[in-house]
Image (cartoon, rainbow, N blue to C red):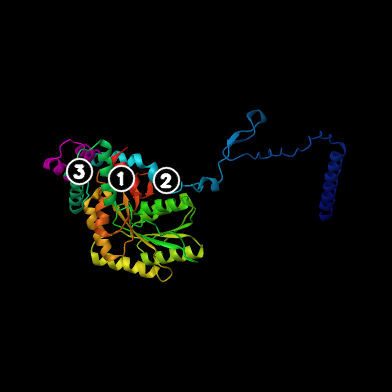
Amino acid sequence: MDGYIGIIVIVAIAAVLAVGGLFLLFRPKAKDLPPVQAPPEPPAPVITEPGTTAGLGEEDGGTTTTLPPPVEELVKAPPIEVPPPSAGRMVRLRGRLARSQNVLGRGLLELLSRDRLDDDVWDEIEEILITADVGVAPTRAMVEDLRTKVKVLGSRTPDEVRRLLREELLAQVAPDLDRTLHTAPTGERPAVVLVVGVNGTGKTTTSGKLARVLVGDGRTVVLGAADTFRAAATDQLQTWGDRVGASVVRGPEGGDPASVAFDAVARGIEDKADTVIIDTAGRLHTKTGLMDELGKVKRVIEKRAAVDEVLLVLDATTGQNGMRQAQVFAEVVNVTGIALTKLDGTAKGGIVISVQRELGVPVKLVGLGEGPDDLAPFDPEVFVDALIGD
């Protein structure tokens, strides 16, 4: 029985093999398949200038795109400006000064030109001078001198009146005062200019404009942002420096002003700069606090270099209030010159006379506008001519 089953299995296997062989022998031929093609290569990129159109047009099966400018062009440094030199600045700004001083100059000329100068007229002349912030003592001196000269002259022509007034005003402005701004380097060290004054007088702006004046004269400048209590002051000074290519040394907000001043002088020495301008804080809470702060800044600076100039910035529009500020600063620091700002925006140009008389310090710079180049070296003759007109 077992032998019979084995024969059947062998026959079955033989049959399967036979059928498979016949299938392989007589199967139909497969049709040739198309060759496999490689995917098309992407179009080569088109290199263009930043911000221009690049890519394939629609007829080429592509799309049109605009390449953004590179990051380094998005954050582009402002161009360095070339300020005009200081020579002739006040002459160019004379018209602006004359417009604001018409009440003073023309009012005096009109009164002095009258045929009869009685006490009432002299009282009007005195009132105009006091209103213009000439000060009580200088006003009385001027009126007395004018009355004497008018009596000597007797009859007066318009030209004589103009000459008379010009001579008197010029004498009061004190043209013989030394108005040299000490900004030239001494040997291997730069000149150091300390800018002081209460906030709101244009102190930081004056520091930046002074840097422009010096750069326009061919000097190299380092700015020290020692007003660390106002972040806005530091940023503002940085902007001024960037515009003319002056280095700016700054410290952390609320940091030690003396440390910033020291570092600024050290940078000036290292860079062989001509001038270092230090913008100090303008807080005027108490005289003692001001003295301590300014005294420390000056002492620390003098460890590296002498302070050549201490400029007190005053706002001409504050009048006698500005005089009181000036007196406080003069008591706590050795002021060598006055920078009088906003002189074009007030008819109180007489403050030039009163501040010099009270402090014994010359006005060296005047601000005659809000433009970057509206700070000028003070010229007494140009100032007086602007007061009385042509």
Tell me the number on the disc at residue 88: 2
Residue 384 tag number = 1
Whole-angstrom CA distance, mark 3 to mark 2, is: 34 Å
Q: Closer to us: mark 3 or mark 1?
A: 3
* Percent of width and height locating residue 356: 27, 56
Q: Please state the horizontal and vertical placement of residue 381, each as a whole percent of the image.
A: 34, 47
Image quarter of residue 297: bottom left
Residue bounds of the magenta highlight: 106-126
Image point (86%, 47%), residue name: 14
Above or below for 147 versus 180:
above
At label 3, counting other C-alpha atoms closer than 10 Å, the crowd grade (few under 14, some 14-19, many 20 or more) is: some
Which residue has dot 3 on it? 150
**Residue 60 visible somewhere in the drawing:** yes
Q: Is residue 16 left or right of residue 39?
A: right
The residue drawn where x is 24% and y is 46% is 348
Quote the CA–CA distance across marks 3 and 1: 20 Å
In the image, 52 versus 84, the foreground residue is 84
Q: Which amino acid does label 2 sit on?
A: Gly
381 or 43, which is in the foreground? 381
